Image (spheres, rainbow, N blue to C red):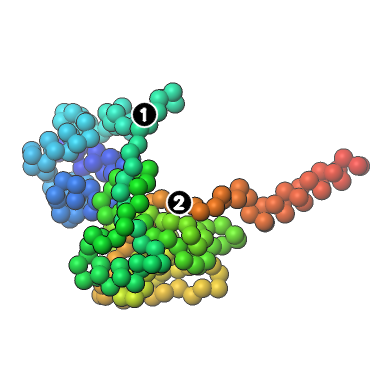
Amino acid sequence: MSFFGKNIKKIRGIKSLSQQAFADIFELKRATLGAYEEGRSEPKVATIIKVANYFSISIDAMLTKEITVNELLRFNDAITTDVNQIVKSKLVQVPFVDVLNMSEFKGSFVGNASYESLPKLSLPVEERIGLLAFEVQDLYMVSNEEGVYPGDVVIGEQCAASDLEENDVVLVLCEDVLCVRRYASSEGSFILKADHAHIPPIELDRNGKVYFWKVVNVLYKRMPTSATKLEDRINQLDAKLAALSDKK
């Protein structure tokens, strides 16, 4: 039994790739990739060669040992642990949904699962399969003055519900609903929660057509505050207590 499955799972973790995204790169089925990672199946030689070449890793290393994170970083020229080196990035063309084209997108994507009609944003983000940028329209994901505000842009990677974990922030499309929420699940349904305390959760039937994009980046329209008002109050109280102690 080779170490191929363990190594590709580690690579996915470092590259922040879902099973579906990784499988799409190498024209595999997600279930097949899962079988590799769990050691239930061994890949074809052609697949091993493709993966090794894509990530600039030797075939011997892929098969005969569990590769460490440091080794993976050294194998990949685009990533470095040397703070004196610069990580080169390129601009990625990401389809963009805003208030002007949102209605059109909701109708067309369900029909043909295509981004073709959407304008593109050139963004300095990691290239992934199925990226989608969405301009936030409401305050539903704000709590204690922190979160995403209207005008902020979330960037999500399309994925299956099975790739999501509880409390992941997702962009979700179902029928006439397109929104940003926090993911949860129960038997027979998906639960989409807002961070805002007064917004009730949305419950969607698992058997319906539901599309998910896991949020992997956020572009803030404003400068995020470094501390919440609660933290500011605590700091002020600490300062007053310290002043009182000095007077004693």
| Quadrant in the picture for residue 87 | top left
Residue 59 seen in render: yes
Crowding at dot 2, Cα within 10 Å, few <14 / some 14-19 / many 20+, comes out as: some
Of marks 2 and 1, which one's residue comes earlier in the chain?
Answer: 1
> In which quadrant of the rendered image does the C terminus lie?
top right
> Picture coordinates of residue 149 (x, y %)?
52, 60
Amino acid of disc 2: Leu
Q: Residue at x 21, y 71 (%)?
A: 111
- 169 versus 138 height, above or below: above
Number of numbered tags placed on the structure image: 2
Residue farthest to the left, as pictured: 45
Q: Nearer the viewer, mark 2 or mark 1?
A: 2
Asked if the residue under mark 1 is in contact with the one under mark 2, i.e. CB atoms within 8 Å, the reply is no
> Picture coordinates of residue 138 (x, y %)?
49, 67
| Quadrant in the picture for residue 188 | bottom left
Q: Residue at x 54, y 62 (%)?
A: 142
> In which quadrant of the rendered image does the N terminus lie?
top left
Residue to which mark 2 is pinned: 219
The residues tagged by marks 2 and 1 sit, at their Cα atoms, a distance apart of 24 Å
Disc ID at residue 80:
1
Looking at the image, residue 225 sits to the left or right of residue 241; the answer is left
> Picture coordinates of residue 31 (x, y %)?
17, 55
Crowding at dot 1, Cα within 10 Å, few <14 / some 14-19 / many 20+, comes out as: some
Where disc 2 sits, the SS reads strand
Q: Nearer the viewer, residue 126 or 227?
A: 126
